[in-house]
Image (cartoon, coloured by chain):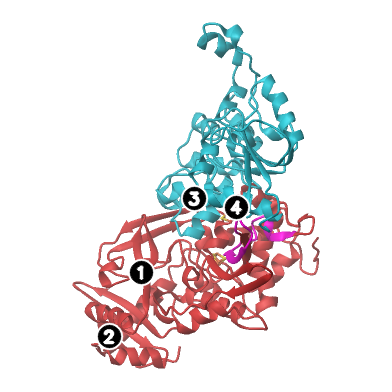
Amino acid sequence: MALSRQSVLTVDGLDALIGKLRERGYRVIGPSVRDHAIVYDDIGDVADLPRGWTDEQDAGQYRLRRRDDDALFGYVVGPQSWKKYLHPPHVALWRARRTGKDVRIEPAPEPTERLALLGVRSCELHAIAIQDRVLLSGAHVDPGYRARREAAFIVAVNCGVTGGTCFCVSMRTGPKVDAGADIALTEIVTAGERVFVLETGSDKGAALLADLPHRWASAAEIAEAKAVVARAAAAMGRDLAADDVPELLLRNLEHPRWDDVAQRCLTCGNCTMVCPTCFCTTVEDTSSLDGTETARTQRWDSCFTMDFSYIHGGSVRTSSRSRYRQWMTHKLATWHQQFGTSGCVGCGRCITWCPVGIDITEEVRAIRAGSRAEGDRHGD
Amino acid sequence: MAANRKKPRLGVWKFASCDGCQLTLLDCEDDLLAVAGAVDIAYFPEATRAEISGRYDLSLVEGSITTPHDAERIHAIRRRSRKLITIGACATAGGIQALRNFADVQAYTSVVYARPDYIETLATSTAIADHVPVDFELRGCPISGRQLIEVIAAFLVGRRPVTPAHSVCVECKLRGTVCVMVAHGTPCLGPVTHAGCGAICPAYNRGCYGCYGPMESPNPVSLSHGLAALGMDARALQRVYRTFNANAPAFRDESARHGK
Ligand code: SF4
Ligand code: SF4
Ligand code: SF4
C-alpha cells in the first residue's frame, strides 16, 4: 500500500470513524459476537465490536474465548468471509411475466447499497482481489458484484494475533496489509490504553481521516505497530510450502492420498462455502403455479455437489475422490493457469470449518511425501 | 395455463403415516388458492370427500407400505396416475414406523394387542418406490410447504423442481448460520443429510436430526468418527441414524454398523 504518514486514533476516534462512514451513507459491516463466534454483521458503533474476545481454531474446531485485555480486533477470521456481502449467497437476476401472448422480462435492479467493510484482514483483501479478477475482468463482468465492489469502502486491520489454522505467510498474503484498503489500522494494546495506528491507502481514506480526531503517530508507536505484525507473522498456525505445489499436484493426480482423503471427505461443501475466493454459482429457475411468472436467482454453488458437474446424462464427478481433487487442484494449481495467482490466500477457514477437520496443508504434505518423481507426470 | 385448458387432476393418497405431509399442503395458506386454481383437486381425503374415479394427472403419495392390502392399493393408484410423486420420509424411506424392520413384529403385536390374530401387517415398512415406479421423491419429515409448492409448480410446466440434493451444511452457509458442530461441539447430521428444511435446527443451536434423509453422496462412516470424537458412544451412534429415515440405505447401514 502506498503508505501515508501514519496517524493515531483513539477508541473514540474509531467510534467517530464508524459514525462518519454512517453519516456518509455507508452500511457499516464488521466483526461482532453471535452464536459463540465472531461473525460479520451490521455495526452501529464500537460497542458492537468483539471487545475482549478471541477465537481458538484448529482443524474442525472453533471456540470463542475471553482475552485478558480489551482488544477490539484480537481475534483472527471467523466463519464468514466478506463474500457474504460482496458476492452474496442469493442474488435475484430477473423475472419474466406473461400476459396473454406478451412476455416481459424485467432484470433485477442493480444494487445501490454502499458497504463499508470494517476489520478486513490482509488475506481477505487478497481474496477480494482474486474475486475481482474472476468477476470483474474479462468479457463477462458480474454487474451486481461490480456495483457493490465499486461502492465499497474498506477499513483493513493488520493482524495482531494469528489463528491455529492461518498460513498467510506461506501464501504471501499477510499478515501485513499491502494493498486494497482505503484505511488500514494496527491495534496497539498497552496497559490501560488502546490506540490504532492508521495509514490511508486512497483519497477516499485520506478524506475520511481529515474528518476524524487524530494525531501523528510517534516513532515508538510506529515501531510498536510494526512489531505487532511481526509477532503475528512469526506465530502462524500452519504452513504450506507453496511454490512447487502446482507442479506437485498435477504430477500426482493418481496419488493414493486422494483415496485416503475421499474416505474422510463428507462432500458437504462447507470448505467451498467458507472460502473467501470460491466464487462458483448456479442459477435456479422457478415458475408460479399459474405459469404466468418465472424468476431466475443466482445461488452459491459448490464443486462438492453432484449438480455442479452435471452435464447431459449425468454428473462427471460422482466420486468424492474426484470432487476433492478437483477442489484442491483448482485452488492450488490450475488457478495459476486460469487467473495468474493461487486460488488460496491461507486464511485457514476450510480447515477450521470442515466438520471432520480435513486440512489442505496436511493433504499437500502427504502428497509431497509420496510424490512421483518429477517428469513422471500422468493423470486420468 | 390458458384459462380454457382443462386443469390437471390431482390426487393426494395416504398410506401408513401421520398425515403431517398432507397437512403441509393445507398449511400453505397463501398458495392454497393458487394450487386450487391450477389443478382440479379430485381426491384429497383430508380436504374433500370425492370418490376415487378415473385417472389422475398428478398423484401425491404420503405414507409407507406396511400391510398386504396397501401393497396392492399402491399398484392401483400407480395405474391411475400419469405422474406419481411421493412426499415425506414415510413414502420415500419407510418413515419412523420402519423401526419395525429392525425388530420382530410378531413379538410386538402379541404384547400390544389383545387379539393379535386381528392384526394383518407386513414385517416391514417400506418406501413407495420399493413397490412401484415413482416419478419424483420429495423428502422431509414433514416436507416443506415451500418445496411442495415448488414441486407442483414445476410439474405443471414440465420442468425439473428446484430441490437440491446437497447437504444441509450448504443451507447453513447460505443463511449464515454458525456451524454448531465446529463452533459448539454439538453433534450434527447435517453433513450427511439432504437439504430442504433450510437448516432450521442449526439456526436454533441444535444439531440436524436428519429429517430429510441421506444427501446425494453421504459419507456417514466418516461423520460417525467425528460424532464419536464429540462423545457419542456406539449406542448413541446406532440410534442417531435410526429415526424418521431409519430404512434409507445409507442411514440403515450406518446404524447397523454400531449395533443390531
Ligand atoms: S482454500 Fe482454505 S485456506 Fe485457502 S483461501 Fe480458501 S478457505 Fe482459505
Ligand atoms: S473437505 Fe471437509 S468441508 Fe470440504 S466437503 Fe470434504 S468434509 Fe466437507
Ligand atoms: S451446523 Fe450441521 S448442518 Fe450446519 S454446517 Fe455445521 S455440520 Fe453442517
> Mark 3, residues whose alpha carbon is within 10 Å: few (<14), some, or many (≥20)?
many
For disc 2, the marked residue is A8
Q: Colour of chain B?
A: cyan
Q: Colour of chain A?
A: red
Percent coordinates x, y for residue B146 in the rendering: 54, 51
- SS category of the residue bearing label 1: strand
Which amino acid type is shown beneath numbered disc 1? Asp
For disc 3, the marked residue is B199
Residue interval drawn in magenta: A288-310
> Mark 4, residues whose alpha carbon is within 10 Å: few (<14), some, or many (≥20)?
many
Percent coordinates x, y for residue B52 in the rendering: 67, 31
Q: Is residue B17 left or right of residue A254?
A: left
- SS category of the residue bearing label 3: loop
Q: Earlier in the sequence, mark 4 or mark 3?
A: 4
Callout in the foreground (3, 2): 3
Percent coordinates x, y for residue B102 in the rendering: 60, 23
Which amino acid type is shown beneath numbered disc 3? Ala
| Residue at 57%, 54% in the rendered image | A358
Which labelled disc corresponds to residue B150? 4
Residue placed most toward the observer, B66 or A62:
B66
Residue lying farthest to the left in this orientation = A192
